[in-house]
Image (cartoon, rainbow, N blue to C red):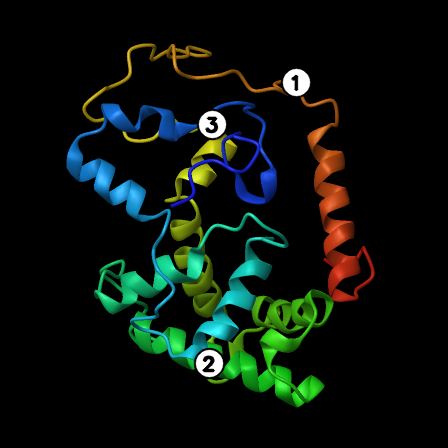
Amino acid sequence: MTRRNETRRPVTPQDRGRFGGFDVLDEVDRWDEVTKREVLGRLAPGTTHKFFTSTEAHVAVALLDLLLAQDREPRIPVLPLIDVRLADGETDGWHYDDMPEDGDAWRQTLAHLDADAMAAHGCGFAELTAEQQAPLVQAVYDAEQWHGLPAKHVWSLWTRYSCTAFYSHPWAWNEIGFGGPAYPRGYKNLRIDGREGWEVPDQAPDDPVPFADRVEQAHDNHADLVGRAPDQR
């Protein structure tokens, strides 16, 4: 169960983060036993799939890495966390009436994505480069209907599950400076810029790049990735 990397620094996804030295797991002894067991279990969710087949998991890992920009280690094990949820029936408790239930929707959409890759490139989605995968996923985002399903609801399925899994993991908490469960320790300094004694300041609280410029650059980078002109948003 990896808590720190070989340099003994806190682990963050792809070693990115703005809260140097902050490790939410330093507070683990303050958590009650149920919380501790639940959170630490996310560090090593296992490699045996309970819900997805090996073929489905292969496609899903590639899709999730692309959606979450997990392009190198350390990666948060998003697919195993989703797999456990679906195997245990822990969905959001609802689904769109024009979509199958979440488990079936995942199986169908992964099969459709793999079929699109085979039609376009002659191989499965997971075998493609990120540059080849991106237009296939972008096509889902841009579409009204995709393989008979409402594309915006497919996109919602993918992003809801991927973001929930990603931000449930302690490494993501380290990246964003989130202090983790408040029970039973609690928070005392509930004010603007107030920090608890165990929190650390943002290493770059004043962003030198105007937000609008960052948005424009992100649009241009995305356009390059999916092979469109920058002004074709």
Q: Secondary structure at mark 2?
A: helix
Q: Secondary structure at mark 3?
A: loop
Q: Is residue 182 visible in this depiction of the protein?
A: no
- Report crowding for label 1: few under 14, some 14 to 19, many 20 or more residues within 10 A (C-alpha): few
Q: Nearer the viewer, residue 34 or 68?
A: 34
Q: Position of residue 62 (x, y in %)?
A: 56, 67
Q: Residue at x 52, y 22 (%)?
A: 21
Q: Label 2 to label 3, Cα distance in Å?
A: 36 Å
Please give the residue where the numbered disc 1 appears in the rendered image: 206
**Amino acid at circle 2:** Thr
Q: Nearer the viewer, residue 130 or 232?
A: 130
**Which circle marks residue 55 in the picture?**
2
Q: Is residue 92 above or below residue 95?
A: above
Residues marked 2 and 1 touching at CB (< 8 Å) = no
Q: Nearer the viewer, residue 89 or 26?
A: 26
Q: Position of residue 200 (x, y in %)?
A: 48, 16
Q: Position of residue 145 (x, y in %)?
A: 52, 78
Q: Label 1 to label 3, Cα distance in Å?
A: 16 Å
Question: Counting residues from the N terminus, which is met first, the one under dot 2 or under dot 1?
Answer: 2
Q: Is residue 194 above or below residue 89?
A: above
- Report crowding for label 2: few under 14, some 14 to 19, many 20 or more residues within 10 A (C-alpha): few
Picture quadrant where residue 198 is located: top left
Relative side of 219 to 173, left or right? right
Please give the residue where the numbered disc 3 appears in the rendered image: 177
**Amino acid at circle 3:** Gly
Picture quadrant where residue 94 is located: bottom left
Q: Quadrant of the C terminus?
A: bottom right
Question: Counting residues from the N terminus, which is met first, the one under dot 1 or under dot 3?
Answer: 3
Q: Is residue 64 above or below residue 17?
A: below
